[in-house]
Image (spheres, rainbow, N blue to C red):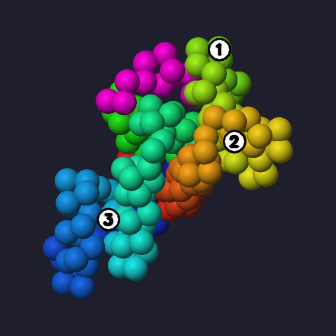
Amino acid sequence: MAAGHIRVPLVQPGTRVELAEVEARIMAERGRVSLLYQVLLNSGPIASGWERMLTAVRNQTGVPADLRELMILRVAVLNGASFEYDAHVPHAQKAGVSADKIEAVRQAALPDVFAPLERLVLELTDAMTRHVVVPEELMARIQQHFDPKGVVEVVATVAAYNMVSRLLVALNVAH
């Protein structure tokens, strides 16, 4: 991540009356208005849509929490989004991801510590994040393990957290 300060001002909760509703939703879902949301609140519509989308991805899909968090950590590593990685380590731990696996997602080539399904979703994560295009062979293996709802949900998880990491990196949100 490039050194420097966050490239937009932080919006302190409670300072803009027009943001009260979205701030209340963020608080209800997350218990706090994090640094990320203080950045996003520079645009009420973006903060609102972001909160709805990421709440759906994180809390309203059938993707098992451990797989979701491994994908999120891997996206953060591949995109150099240290803030995202650090923010999701506790979520991964809570989901039962071992310390070895949390560390292993940091490796350029994935080591052999992952179960077959974990490795599969991490292969998807790598393809989507590094190349955007998912090879037919890989998608066929994803479709063997997930029904259409599950396919959309795992792909949306990787896509959404690529969005998160790219915003964080572009705006120098690193701490």
Residue 36, quarter of the rendered image: bottom left
Check the image and report above or below for 97 versus 5: above
Reading the image, the residue beneath label 2 is: 143
Check the image and report above or below for 161 versus 72: below
Q: Residue at x 66, y 31 (%)?
A: 120
- Nearer to me, 137 or 70: 137
- Nearer to me, 113 or 118: 118
Q: Residue furthest left?
A: 14
* Residues drawn in magenta: 94-105
Q: Residue furthest right?
A: 136
Query: What amino acid does circle 3 point to?
Result: Gln
Nearer to us of marks 2 and 3 is 2
Q: Earlier in the sequence, mark 1 or mark 3?
A: 3
Query: What amino acid does circle 1 point to?
Result: Asp
Binning the other alpha carbons within 10 Å of mark 2 as few (below 14), some (14 to 19) or many (20 upward) gives few
Mark 1 and mark 2: span between their CA atoms? 23 Å
Quick check: 135 left or right of 24? right
Mark 2 and mark 3: span between their CA atoms? 38 Å
Q: Residue furthest bottom?
A: 18
Q: Residue at x 20, y 53 (%)?
A: 31
Q: Earlier in the sequence, mark 1 or mark 2?
A: 1
Check the image and report above or below for 28 versus 104: below
Reading the image, the residue beneath label 1 is: 112
- Nearer to me, 60 or 8: 60
Q: Residue at x 65, y 14 (%)?
A: 112
